[in-house]
Image: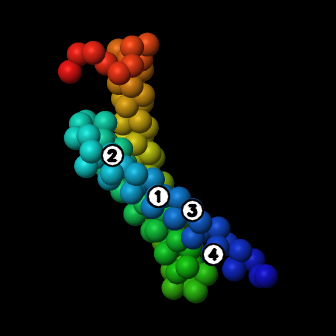
Amino acid sequence: MSTSIIDTLLGIIGIIAQLLIFIASMYFLVKCKGTEAILLTIGSAFSLIMSIFYRVISYLVSSGSITGENTTSMYSIAGFFSTIFYVIFAVGFFMLLFKLANQPKQDFSQFPPTNY
């Protein structure tokens, strides 16, 4: 296999992983409408878009459609926005963790429950 085929396969695997995270975030948003669900969905959606953008830019560079100077500026701008979207996702994820950690513990010692 050539290097470009391996690079393409690794890029597709990365995009599939981002897509799965986006689908899980959308499912969570549909089930639980909250701030953390919104932040997770926004962060994962734009991270997926940025991953696709990186793949398109690398394809355009390899085909010679974009010069080196344009590539550098595009990667700089995309890197800045990617960082913001990763931080948005991380904030939503930590909010979800804190919400789950602070929930009261359920007592399953009495089964079936006597109070309906």
Q: Amino acid at mark 4?
A: Thr
Q: Are marks 2 and 3 in contact (CB under 8 Å)?
A: no
Q: Are marks 1 and 4 in contact (CB under 8 Å)?
A: no
The tag earlier along the polypeptide, 4 or 2, is 4
Numbered mark located on residue 28 in the image = 2
Q: Amino acid at mark 2?
A: Phe
The tag earlier along the polypeptide, 1 or 4, is 4
Q: Amino acid at mark 1?
A: Leu
Q: Nearer the viewer, mark 2 or mark 3?
A: 2
Query: Gap between marks 2 and 3, in whole Å?
Result: 21 Å
The tag earlier along the polypeptide, 2 or 1, is 1
The tag earlier along the polypeptide, 3 or 1, is 3
Q: Is residue 99 visible?
A: yes
Q: Can you identify the residue that label 4 sits on?
A: 8
Q: Are marks 4 and 3 in contact (CB under 8 Å)?
A: no
Q: Can you identify the residue that label 3 sits on?
A: 14
- Asked whether 97 or 110 is in front, the reply is 110
Q: Is residue 102 above or below residue 24?
A: above
